[in-house]
Image (cartoon, rainbow, N blue to C red):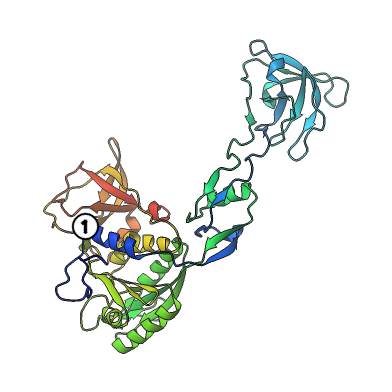
Amino acid sequence: MSDTVPNDCFAPSAGLMQHGEAVGLLKSRIIPVGGVEAVALSAAGGRILAEEICAPYDVPRHTNAAVDGYAFAASDYSRTEGTSFALAGRAAAGHPLQQMPGTGEAVRILTGAVLPEGVDTVAMQEDVEISGDAANSSGPRVRIPGGLKPGANVRKAGEDVRAGHELFSNGHLLRPQDLAALASIGRGIVSCSRRLRVGIVSSGDEVIRAGQRELGIGEVYDANAPMLEALVRLTGAEAIDLGIWPDRRDEVTSRLAEAANSLDVIITSGGASLGEEDHMSAALGMLGSCHFWRIAVKPGRPMMFGQIGSATMIGLPGNPVAVFVCFLMYVYPLLRRSSGAAWPEPRRFMLPAAFEFANRKLGRREFWRASLIEGPNGLMAEKFARDGSGLISGLRAADGLIEVGEDVPAVARGDAIAFIPFSEFGILGR
């Protein structure tokens, strides 16, 4: 552990940790959990690959026609005047022509058919003229107009992938298009990292599950658990609902100890401060080690990171916006890394601000909800007008987050600002 990180992060002397320090500490502490399993390709979407995969052969494996038309040898063809060819047979996908066409002969060919030996160019069927009796063998001919380049309308063997080329490295998150690439080289089963088992906990006597009953005075519906479960699944991990834990320290401690014995990661929301009813932080202090608590970030200051045995614990704030932002910036990469992938760093796109913000408090990193709008010279980032951490409407309206550094005192309209789209985390747009 770094000398700048106190052994007891709950001690009064422990100050707020800067965003960069928090990310650096997470990177240094988190290693892949381990465990590999064979997964059918149809079920491998969103999983973390646990092997390097190279193409065993060229893709496509054979040179083939890209269109329905007529194949011929460019050496027999006049690009300036065009050429008339005798038809020598027919080739379709899965039904290659058995004989090699002779000099001055063309082949009727359909999309995907293997290009017969001796021909190298295809004319589209709508561009040619057929003469003679094409219904029998009485000498039909095809006239191909001039202007075609040698190799036109042909997909060459290895055009997509060459044999021996590395398609994927160990730790790659498999996307739908990756499954297509794996299928194209004949892989029906792949080795993937074992799914992380991630427990989701909500905390507080005032918290009620949606659909359970009508709210009483002072009660709130649990907005965090369903959101966190969906976010966890975006990382390829398994989300396990551990329910709502009451504001009783002994029960919180007992449940946390039990969860740490069977899960890889435990994510809690609420109870991460040091109030009389904030028991999550106290339970972590009793059962394990705290690596940081309270970060200089808005929203999300009361966030914990620690370990209980081999289990990682993340204590998130209680407000939904803070939960969402902290998950994206800290928990999402943590889960990906724990699953065997490299630490994913979201891309920042510099866009002009479509707003003004003055007299900003320095010394903390801020993440503002923002939507993209069309400006006079292209896209601009518009900040959501209200900053409250409980305003879920801002998350719904947003396309991503504006990241504002600790030393930025103000933002003027037109200033270049860092925009992180939600798509960087696999979240679909509106």
Look at the image and tell me in which quarter the N terminus lies: bottom left
In this view, the residue in front, 42 or 68, is: 42
Quarter of the image where one finds residue 284: bottom left
Specify the amino acid type for callout 1: Arg
Vertical placement of 108 versus 320: above or below?
Answer: above
Vertical placement of 53 versus 209: above or below?
Answer: above
Q: Determine the residue positioned at 21% across, 64% down.
A: 17
- Report x, y in % for residue 122: 68, 25
In this view, the residue in front, 393 or 288, is: 288
Residue 396 in view of the camera: yes
Vertical placement of 179 versus 266: above or below?
Answer: above
Q: Determine the residue positioned at 42% across, 61% down.
A: 336
Bin the neighbour count of mark 1 within 10 Å (Cα to Cα): few under 14, some 14-19, many 20 and up: many
The secondary structure type at the circle numbered 1 is: strand
Quarter of the image where one finds residue 104: top right
| Drawn side of residue 88 relative to residue 326, left or right | right
Q: Which residue reaches farthest top?
A: 81
Vertical placement of 153 versus 312: above or below?
Answer: above
Disc 1: which residue? 365
In this view, the residue in front, 302 or 351, is: 302
Q: Determine the residue positioned at 85% across, 19% down.
A: 139
